[in-house]
Image (spheres, grey):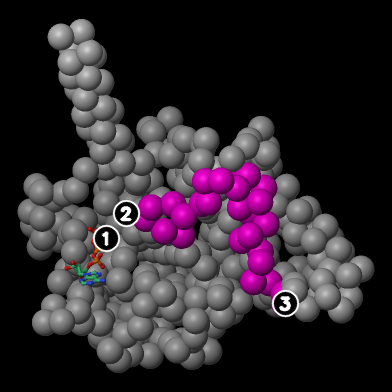
């Protein structure tokens, strides 16, 4: 966990374990408080940035999907990345986490240049992401999915072949960590169920839990609420805040402005590949230019997963009815 990676003043204090446990939460409060003094302009500097990106450009043929001159992410805070469809948010996520290659650009995480690293190496540095459409493997159990999330931690094939006892110890630790996360995300009951049998919301929780298997410093969530029913949304919100309380930095892409207002400490607005506004949620969302750019482009927003599922169900019902009528004709 990040709390273990970072220097802890409480470890050397006389306050003992209670103080040690409380410390990440206090660090989170300090990080959020420090943001109040941050510059409210695109590319503005942050008091304690964990990620700094410069001149990140990605083109697809003639289309410039991302053209970010400079952006900084405050350590220990929750930053929302918003913007109309096609603004470049997911592409920017893909670039930062090594899932796509830029035309140009340099970004540093915890001071290290990670701009040319493959995704698993980025994860080892402490930066992990989840995907807009969940990537959990349907034919594997929930526990197996989690264990897979840790598979980049060590060269386990090497351990397995040379030092089977150490490998088994590592395996036991991975399962222990998985069980902790199952508890935290209320997934204990479905531990041995196939991931494919989970609801949309439970899959989002699994995806988030899987990202945490490597003990990251920063988590990037791509549309964590998409396809999640309203009942589970509140619980997901709390989980996102919980990541901050544990000392993690969170960046998330979200279209639902209520969620953004509710969860984020800072908002970065992208449009046409560029960062066009930054600031605390209420201030940013009150800007007319942001409202126009955002709402204007949402008239033709794609369907949510729920809407898509509903449409598919309706289509299936129509087909079934037609087949039934053909059969009786
Ligand atoms: N692999 C690709 N090939 C060609 N064009 C792409 C590719 N990936 C993204 N794009 C284009 O780049 C632009 C930015 O897309 P991106 O998915 O990053 O936007 P976004 O802000 O995440 O949108 P949304 O909110 O709809 O997810 C869009 O015009 C998109 O069509």
Where residue 93 sits, quadrant-wise, is: bottom left
In front: label 3 or label 1: 3
Label 2 CB-ligand 1 distance < 8 A: no
Distance CA(mark 2)–CA(mark 1): 6 Å
Please indicate whether residue 97 sits to the left or right of residue 66 in the image. Answer: right
Q: Which mark is residue 58?
A: none
Ligand number 1: quarter of image: bottom left
Residue 82: numbered disc: 1
User: Which residue appears at 34% of the width and 59% of the height?
Assistant: 253
Q: Assign a secondary structure to mark 3.
A: loop
Mark toward the start of the polypeptide (2 vs 1)? 1
Q: Main secondary structure of the magenta part?
A: loop
Membership of 144 in magenta stretch: yes
Residue 190 lies, with reference to residue 101, above or below; the image says above
Residue drawn at 58 percent across, 56 percent down:
210
Residue marked by disc 2: 254
* Residue located beneath label 3 in the image: 155
Decide: few, some or many residues near mark 3? Use Cα within 10 Å; few <14, some 14-19, many ≥20.
Answer: few
Q: Is residue 14 left or right of residue 115?
A: right
User: Percent x, y for residue 1?
Assistant: 67, 65
Q: Is residue 136 magenta?
A: yes
Looking at the rendering, the stretch of residues picked out in magenta corresponds to: 130-155
Is 4 above or below relative to 98?
Answer: above
Neighbour class for label 1 at 10 Å: few (<14), some, many (≥20)?
Answer: many
Seen from this angle, which residue lies furthest top? 328
Image position of 22 with respect to 310: above or below: below
- Quarter containing the C terminus: top left
Query: Which comes sooner in the sequence, label 2 or label 3?
Result: 3
Instruction: Pinpoint residue 220: horizontal percent, then vertical percent.
Output: 45, 64
Mark 3–mark 1 Cα distance, whole angstroms, equals 37 Å
Q: Earlier in the sequence, mark 3 or mark 1?
A: 1
């Amino acid at each position: 966990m990040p709390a273990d990676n970072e220097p802890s003043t409480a470890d050397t204090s006389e306050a003992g374990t209670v103080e040690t446990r409380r410390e990440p939460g206090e660090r989170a409060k300090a990080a959020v408080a420090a943001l109040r003094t941050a510059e409210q302009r695109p590319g503005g500097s942050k008091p304690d940035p964990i990620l700094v990106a410069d001149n990140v450009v990605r083109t697809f043929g003639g289309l410039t999907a991302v053209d970010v001159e400079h952006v900084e992410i405050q350590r220990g805070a929750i930053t929302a990345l918003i913007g109309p469809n096609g603004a470049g948010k997911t592409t920017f996520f893909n670039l930062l986490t090594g899932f796509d290659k830029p035309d140009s650009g340099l970004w540093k995480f915890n001071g290290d240049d990670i701009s040319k690293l493959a995704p698993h190496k980025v994860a080892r540095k402490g930066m992990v992401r989840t995907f807009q459409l969940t990537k959990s493997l349907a034919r594997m159990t929930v526990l197996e999915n989690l264990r897979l999330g840790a598979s980049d931690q060590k060269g386990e094939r090497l351990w397995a072949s040379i030092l089977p006892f150490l490998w088994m110890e590592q395996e036991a630790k991975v399962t222990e960590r998985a069980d902790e996360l199952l508890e935290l995300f209320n997934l204990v009951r479905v531990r041995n169920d196939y991931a494919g049998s989970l609801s949309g919301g439970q899959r989002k929780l699994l995806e988030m839990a899987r990202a945490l298997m490597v003990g990251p410093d920063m988590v990037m969530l791509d549309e964590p609420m998409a396809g999640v029913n309203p009942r589970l949304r509140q619980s997901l919100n709390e989980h996102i805040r919980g990541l901050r309380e544990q000392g993690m930095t969170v960046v998330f892409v979200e279209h639902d402005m209520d969620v953004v207002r509710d969860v984020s400490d800072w908002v970065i607005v992208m449009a046409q590949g560029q960062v066009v506004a930054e600031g605390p949620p209420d201030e940013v969302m009150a800007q007319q230019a942001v409202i126009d750019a955002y709402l204007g482009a949402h008239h033709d927003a794609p369907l949510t997963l729920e809407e898509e599922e509903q449409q598919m169900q309706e289509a299936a019902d129509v087909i079934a009815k037609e087949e039934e009528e053909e059969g009786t004709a």
